[in-house]
Image (cartoon, grey):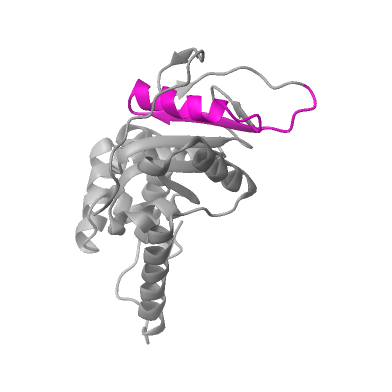
């Protein structure tokens, strides 16, 4: 487990915000400003307000209530789970935003899953100062990568391992995905749940569950996130 010590982040005196749900709301920019629009979401209000207070100190950032094309979505998580991966995929692929993940712990096996969601900037929670967050936000807004040095080294190792495995193949893989499985996984990667997928594909929910169970069992995949990562690596979606 890659992890970092937990610290408490407090907001600056005199700051205030109107929040509903998981995202932070802020004012509008002045004419002529060229600020990066940013949304902040977290699993708890203290983390959300703390991150927003850190960003609010910097004039190059404009806090917004909703993410969308051209915005940077900053997500604060203690650890990565399937729900967090779904949120990341929805933000990047459905809403068209760029994502920054602030996380307290990240397993090595989850690193490629995060990158394949479209996240190019990751910040350890214990390193999430105002300056560090703004650095990651600006990098994400430009489409650049920004990873802690320890994560970057592990990512390079994982990619090298994948490349060596691909180079060693001398024949066609003995596995693959059916068109039905690809359709289901594509919708999973966009953040839709079982009922929504069934409605979009005109399947029953039981059929969708059977499709997911069949492919994860056949290919020895751990869960939906792992199945989506597999499909991305193999070029199916």
User: Which residue is found at the position 37% from the left and 50% from the top?
Assistant: 185
Q: Is residue 136 above or below residue 198?
A: below
Please provide the residue range marked out in magenta.
31-60
Q: Quadrant of residue 26?
A: top right
Q: Is residue 206 above or below residue 235?
A: above
User: Which residue is found at the position 50% from the left and 51% from the top?
Assistant: 120
Q: Quadrant of residue 145?
A: bottom right
Report whether 181 appears left or right of 223. Answer: right
Q: Position of residue 88 (x, y in %)?
A: 43, 41
Q: How many marks?
A: 0
Q: Position of residue 70 (x, y in %)?
A: 64, 37
Front in this rendered view, residue 81 or 190: 81
Front in this rendered view, residue 125 or 171: 125
Q: Position of residue 168 (x, y in %)?
A: 36, 85
Q: Which residue is at the far bottom?
A: 170
Report whether 59 appears left or right of 31. Answer: left
Q: Is residue 223 located in the magenta-colored stretch of the structure?
A: no
Using the rendered image of the protein, determine whether residue 191 is visible from the camera's viewpoint: no
User: Which residue is found at the position 43% from the left and 61% from the top?
Assistant: 152
Q: Position of residue 13 (x, y in %)?
A: 48, 16
Front in this rendered view, residue 40 or 90: 40
Q: Quadrant of residue 160?
A: bottom left
Using the rendered image of the protein, determine whether residue 9 is visible from the camera's viewpoint: yes
Report whether 3 appears left or right of 139. Answer: left
Q: Quarter holding the N terminus?
A: bottom left
Q: Is residue 158 above or below residue 18?
A: below
Report whether 160 appears left or right of 133. Answer: left
User: Which residue is found at the position 60% from the left and 50% from the top?
Assistant: 143
Q: Is residue 11 above or below residue 210?
A: above
Q: Which residue is at the far front?
A: 13
């Amino acid at each position: 487990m890659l992890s970092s010590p937990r610290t408490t982040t407090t907001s600056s005196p005199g700051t205030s915000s109107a929040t509903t749900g998981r995202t932070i709301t802020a004012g509008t920019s002045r004419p002529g400003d060229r600020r990066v629009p940013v949304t902040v979401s977290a699993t708890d209000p203290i983390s959300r307000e703390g991150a927003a207070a850190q960003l609010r100190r910097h004039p190059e950032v404009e806090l917004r209530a909703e993410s969308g094309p051209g915005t940077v979505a900053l997500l604060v998580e203690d650890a990565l789970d399937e729900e967090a991966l779904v949120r990341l995929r929805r933000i990047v692929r459905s809403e068209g935003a760029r994502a920054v993940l602030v996380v307290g712990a990240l397993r090595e096996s989850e690193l490629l899953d995060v990158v394949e969601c479209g996240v190019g900037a990751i910040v350890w929670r214990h390193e999430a100062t105002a300056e560090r967050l703004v650095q990651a936000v600006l990098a994400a807004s430009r489409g650049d990568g920004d990873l802690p040095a320890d994560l970057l080294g592990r990512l390079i190792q994982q990619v090298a391992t994948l490349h060596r495995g691909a180079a060693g193949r001398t024949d066609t893989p003995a596995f693959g995905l059916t068109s039905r499985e690809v359709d289901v996984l594509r919708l999973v990667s966009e953040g839709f749940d079982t009922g929504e997928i069934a409605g979009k594909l005109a399947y029953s929910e039981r059929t969708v569950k059977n499709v997911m169970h069949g492919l994860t069992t056949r290919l020895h995949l751990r869960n939906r996130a792992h199945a989506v990562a597999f499909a991305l690596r193999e070029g199916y979606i």
